[in-house]
Image: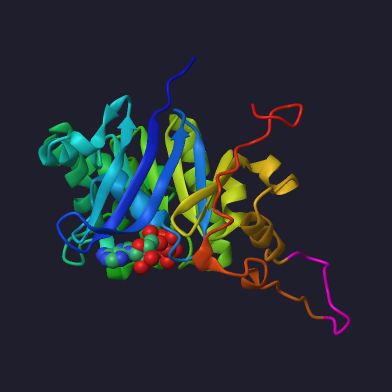
Amino acid sequence: MTAPLLDIRNLRLGVALGRSVHHPLLKDVTFQIMPGEAYGLVGESGSGKSITSLAVMGLLKKPLAVTSGEILFKGQNLLSRPKREMRRLRGNRIAMIFQEPMTALNPLSTVGRQIAEMFVLHQGRSWGEAERLAVEALGNVRVPNPDRRAKNYPHQMSGGLRQRVMIAMALACNPDLLIADEPTTALDVTVQAEVLRLIKELCAARGTAVLFISHDLGVIASICQRVGVMYAGCLVEENETRALFENPRHAYTRGLLGALPRLGSRSAHGRQRLVDIDSIIADRSTLTETRFIAPRGPEGGQP
Ligand SMILES: Nc1ncnc2c1ncn2[C@@H]1O[C@H](COP(=O)(O)OP(=O)(O)OP(=O)(O)O)[C@@H](O)[C@H]1O
């Protein structure tokens, strides 16, 4: 049997309130991503999606701290790796793209130079060779006129093109895992669709696994084979994407699906009614619905 690429086990994470007291933010989060698989984490704002990905990248900053659990990447626990090794891993074996590329790109350096830096830092290439590879990388993410565009500064590009630059940087070293945290939320719908298609095609062609984070189940469904649903710091349900849509078992997942706008569903006034998820989960503080629900096996039992 193939071993998981990423294996997060009982991850607990919190805000340090004192030396040993933590306010919990993640509670026993457990999920696996197989090599080449696209896995989606969906949940409302504040449910813990981003801090999960930052923990994987080793980028949590105080007062946030992992209190227990394991993050195994290719069988090795990232939580016990020295900082130097994590720096080598980031950008090389695990790469990340964020919602707003402007915050991740250096405004004072051309995009070609920034992509070239990946080849110099992680692959020890000469600058001349790295700059040639950077133009090639821009072409691979379908940036028109890559030679000319490589000389642009980030502010000279549209949001969609900047996100393509981020994807080119992230995939430069052919990582095993790409973490995409709401990469298309800030883009127009048409540009969003193009960028999603690009991520999907490039990762499938290279066999790169994806951890795709979004609050939008529709976006997740277009790219991921499996989905984990997060609510209040817990992974409350996990299933294959199609099965989750056909048979959502957790109240919060049903709420999320019910809140997806659908073509053709209109009220008597001709307007579509949007469903309020809060009306489905009455009291968040009790967290009575945060029990994990695993996918059913073929006969409806556990697989
Ligand atoms: N530096 C921090 N200090 C204290 N609490 C934090 C810090 N960063 C995040 N949190 C808290 O951790 C919880 C999870 O945050 P996280 O950013 O992971 O949510 P999210 O699901 O990614 O939401 P969003 O979609 O809005 O980014 C939230 O309650 C948030 O307020």
Q: Against 207, is 216 above or below?
A: below
- Seen at 34% across and 41% down, the residue is 171
User: Where is residue 220 shown, x and y percent of the image?
Assistant: 57, 51
Can residue 239 be seen here? The reply is yes
User: Where is residue 138 shown, x and y percent of the image?
Assistant: 35, 48
User: Where is residue 183 shown, x and y percent of the image?
Assistant: 43, 57
Q: Quadrant of residue 135?
A: top left
Q: Is residue 40 left or right of residue 255?
A: left
Front residue of this view, candidates 53 and 296: 296
User: Where is residue 213 shown, x and y percent of the image?
Assistant: 46, 53
Q: Indicate yes or no whether the magenta region holds residue 177.
A: no
Please provide the residue range marked out in magenta.
Answer: 262-270
Q: Indicate yes or no whether the magenta region holds residue 263.
A: yes
Residue extending farthest bottom? 269
Front residue of this view, candidates 99 and 20: 20
- Seen at 50% across and 41% down, the residue is 39
